[in-house]
């Protein structure tokens, strides 16, 4: 596809849906039968630490039972073969983009396979169950690790890098996200201000669908490989 050099891609829970990981707003506003405010806020962690740790322990365990799908694999191919600048910004906390092979990747909402130490602020790789007890690999503090997931009200990771990438981009593509969670939901407006092309690939129109130059509706496992093939001219 001619004319583009620098691409910023935003992905959401929809790209992992066909791997078997549930999205959360699409059906009933719940994430695995929990209200967002009960498992995704600093207040929930303070009030009910066991429930929150158990929830993310279960999500981490579930990750081992799923695989990247054709959407993740196509983006990883684009990452490998695209000669221009490219940044995949994901809101997902799963590790399916990197398991597919993507490297130019930023987890703006954190990662299930990482822990955040409340004592020293360190971020450490973590694959186990926090409910079983933890020791921080950096400072040695006991039972001070929490999921390295950005809760509502907390600052997403990498905002400066994302804004810089958007300022340099000439194409913004949003895949499988409902457009309900800010600041990610506002990236399309930033892209429009920068007068770059915007494309949405989603199962249904997102909240900010009207901001996109073009929306293609369908499953990520079908739409994303088709789009990548056109971008790579194959
Ligand atoms: P969301 O659940 O709010 O919306 C999912 C979107 O994906 C919907 O618009 C839906 O129409 C679309 N979708 C569903 N199946 C699809 C498919 N097969 N192909 C293409 N699109 C499909 O998700 P969000 O906008 O990413 O916001 C949710 C927040 O919840 C994020 O911040 C994320 O951290 C968290 N979350 C993460 C995961 C994960 O890591 N896999 C899963 C659930 C929630």
Image: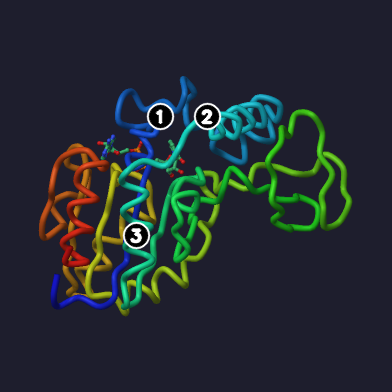
Circle 2 — which element?
Answer: loop
Residue 200's place in the image compared with 143, above or below, is below
Q: Earlier in the sequence, mark 3 or mark 2?
A: 2
As drawn, which residue projects farthest toward the front? 234
Residue 82's place in the image compared with 182, above or below, is below
State the image quarter where residue 164 is shown.
Answer: bottom left
Provide the residue designation for mark 2: 65
Provide the residue designation for mark 1: 20
Provide the residue designation for mark 3: 77
Residue occupying image coordinates x 31% and y 71%: 82
The reply to whether the C-beta atoms of the residues labelled 3 and 1 are less than 8 Å apart is no
Q: Earlier in the sequence, mark 3 or mark 1?
A: 1
Instruction: Give percent across and percent down for residue 80.
Output: 38, 66
Q: Quadrant of ligand 1?
A: top left
Cα distance between the residues tagged 2 and 1:
9 Å
State the image quarter where residue 123 is shown.
Answer: bottom right
């Amino acid at each position: 596809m001619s004319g583009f050099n620098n691409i910023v891609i935003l992905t959401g829970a929809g790209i992992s849906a066909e791997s078997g990981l549930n999205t959360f707003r699409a059906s009933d506003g719940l994430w695995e039968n929990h209200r967002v405010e009960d498992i995704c806020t600093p207040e929930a962690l303070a009030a009910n630490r066991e429930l929150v740790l158990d929830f993310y322990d279960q999500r981490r365990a579930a990750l081992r039972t799923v695989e990247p799908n054709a959407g993740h694999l196509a983006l990883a191919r684009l990452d490998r073969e695209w000669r221009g600048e490219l940044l995949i910004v994901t809101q997902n906390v799963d590790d399916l983009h990197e398991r597919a092979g993507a490297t130019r990747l930023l987890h703006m909402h954190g990662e299930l396979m990482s822990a955040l130490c409340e004592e020293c602020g360190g971020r450490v790789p973590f694959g186990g169950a926090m409910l079983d007890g933890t020791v921080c690999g950096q400072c040695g503090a006991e039972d001070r690790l929490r999921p390295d997931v950005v809760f509502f009200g907390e600052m997403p990771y990498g905002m400066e890098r994302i804004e810089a990438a958007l300022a340099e981009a000439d194409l913004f593509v949003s895949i499988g996200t409902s457009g309900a969670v800010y600041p990610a939901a506002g990236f399309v407006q930033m892209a429009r201000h920068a007068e770059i092309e915007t494309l949405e690939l989603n199962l249904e129109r997102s909240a900010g669908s009207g901001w996109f130059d073009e929306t293609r509706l369908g499953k990520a496992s079908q739409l994303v490989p088709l789009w990548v093939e056109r971008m790579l001219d194959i």
